[in-house]
Amino acid sequence: MTAPRPADPPSEDLSRLAALHGVATSYSPSPDRSVAASATAVTLALAALGVDASTPGAVRAALAAREGELGERLLPPTVVGWSGSPPAALAALPGGTRLRIDTEQGESRASADGLPPGVHRLTATTPDGRTATAHLIVAPPRLPAPAGRSYGLLVQLYSLLSRRSWGMGDLGDLAELAGWAGRSLGAGFVQVNPLHAAVPGAPTDPSPYRPSSRRFPDPVHLRIEDVPEAAYVEDPGRLRALLERSGRLREAVLHQGALIDRDAVWELKREALELLGEVPLGPGRRAAYCDFLAGQGQALEDHATWCALAEVHGSDWHRWPTGLRDPRSAETARARNGLMDRVDFWSRLAWLTDTQLTAAQRAGREAGMPVGIVHDLAVGVHPGGADAWAQQEYFAAGMSVGAPPDAFNARGQDWGLPPWRPDRLAASGYAPFRELLRALFRYAGALRIDHVMGLFRLWWVPQGHPPTEGTYVRYDAEAMLAVLVLEASRAGALVIGEDLGTVEPGVREALRERGVLGTSVLWFERDWDGDGRPLPPDGWRADCLATATTHDLPSTAARLTGEHVELRDSLGLLTRPLEEERAEAAADVGEWLSALSRLGLLHGTGGGGDPSSEEAQIQAVHRFLLRTPARMVGVWLPDGVGDRRPQNLPGTWDQYPNWRLPIADAQGRPVTLEDLAASPRLRALMEVLRGDGHEAGEHEAGEGGP
């Protein structure tokens, strides 16, 4: 491995300039250590923000310009206010300044007092005639806490095949799961992976966390038979033939050891959707489609145009003919007109997918779920995809999001996702973020935000440089949170932030203040400020979703048995001798089992079974989660049947079938949705959450602790 090049620390002037633009000049890989960012990283980050810092003279000129701009500025581009308190930025205005606020609701006001939530237009005029305008975001001070405690299921949708799936789980399966889990298990929610539109390829990247668009969902998740036009295709024989071929795909995954093949599924569904697209919409359906087009506006037209152009020129817009790289060019307008049938096809697929997503949420709520479907927002988008093409002005050119070096990864990480420019977001009143959230909340009872720390800062890695040569760039977290709270409150939805790993001081506190729940995973919850032992249940935070594992971690069965260590060893991923890793993993599990035993949570299963069995231990883990004050408790659905395999193994690419595995039982046999519904093991685990009501309430009495 090549050693990182030593950092060339920024000069004093460059550091001052960077600070004025929110670019960090150092970072802390651990609480007791600070590392200087390189001058190169800082200079390139500033360049991506439109600031020339390439020479000492350019730095001085840019510094003078920025200081002058800030000194003369009456208002920032976006002002934030929380209902019930005046925006802090207004206090800095000169005495006698007149305000005019044109509200989102169509009113004109002369005061910021009592403004309704929304995104308003603020104009300030000083006594000496200076005028400034700004976006004014007013949000409720916090999101309401969940109404009581709820428990639910966590699942990667593609992995949930039913006997009706076309080779991977779909939105029909999601609606069935939500309806069954709500009515039969008493579940309050189902959390799924991001269902964003993927970048087509050969093969398509199966990761749901590097999408083409976060704004629009992927039609590969459609249940074809649930589209009303499927009943009226001109050639029903062709549709039946596709159904038969999809059945062979499904059987290969369920009974022949095949991996989930998203591209093969999409090939069949796309052919079917082309058939359905030839069926005229009835008057009511046509009216609903037109309403959807009008509501989505330019964003949908851009997305569908990118999809149509990608069919002709490939899925990386950087390689398209020069004129088509600009979504607003005359060449793009001509190309769109020439491809209008394909633009309409992709627009219709977005509508169909939106309707089935809405139906899944409705199925959950009608089944008694207080939350319903929890959707997942990926941290970014593919640089060659639809969002990066349509919103180029909002992305930092030449930069990629990642993570700095730390104790777990000395080389840092580069995720290959272009970051948003904080300056352009602020200038627009955070319009892209608002529109993104509004689109997702159309069909979400709650939204999980991957790497929620990115609302505060992101690690920018210059293209062509290793992740060690990046630096943090800060965002206006108050504005980002205000937009998040505003849109979630309008939808009546919850927000869950994925705040695992290294989190800078103050972030969790800021999220909690605004009603954003965190994420707590059992194996990581230890008394890190004390003896390092498992954290007692009454020491856990209440404002969180508590789980035993996630899609990026070993299943609970694999962790209890140590099979996750053997898997990593077989793939050459261990950094220490196998015996050391085994011993550490066994000691970690042993401490937790001792804690569970001391709390009296290890019961035999099935009326007097062995309390040391794997199934009993998994149940005990979830009894422990119920002892905590966590407002939401999640069960990784594969844990219900003893699945050993992680859905994603970080650090691997082609060495492991990430994002392509069906849910399987303890013997590795794929399990269908119908099998899950009939599984005594899963039902027994869910009865722990449903039936042990005294366990769920004990945290209120302050009982227990390892």
Image (tube, grey):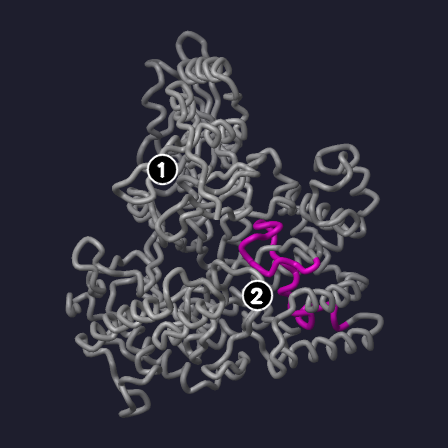
The amino acid beneath tag 2 is: Ala
User: Which residue is disc 2 drawn over?
Assistant: 359
Residue 350 picture location, percent across and down: 66, 55
Which residue shows up at 75% across the image and 38% down it? 324
Q: In which quarter of the image is the C terminus?
A: bottom left
Q: Residue at x 61, y 38 (%)?
A: 391
**Residue at point 32% right, 69% down?**
585
Q: Please determine whether, in this image, residue 76 is positioned above or below residue 704.
A: above
Q: Which of the 4 image quadrants contains residue 252?
A: bottom right
Closest to the observer, 497 or 356: 497
Residue 643, quarter of the rendered image: bottom left
Query: Bounds of the magenta span?
Result: 202-231
- Residue 606's disc is none
Q: Which amino acid does label 1 sit on?
A: Tyr
- Residue 641 location, x and y as percent? 44, 80
Any part of residue 640 in sight: yes
Disc 2 secondary structure class: helix
Residue, far top: 128
Q: Kindly identify which residue carries mark 1.
A: 27
Q: Give the residue at the far bottom of this rendering.
A: 608
User: Is residue 204 a member of the stretch shown in magenta?
Assistant: yes
Q: Horizontal placement of 499 versus 118: left or right?
A: left
Q: How far apart are marks 2 and 1 (CA)?
A: 45 Å
- Vertical side of 299 occupied by 184: above or below: below
Relative to 622, does residue 86 appear above or below in the rendering?
Answer: above
Q: Which comes sooner in the sequence, label 2 or label 1?
A: 1
Give the image location of residue 419, x and y in percent.
52, 40
Circle 2/circle 1 CB separation < 8 Å: no
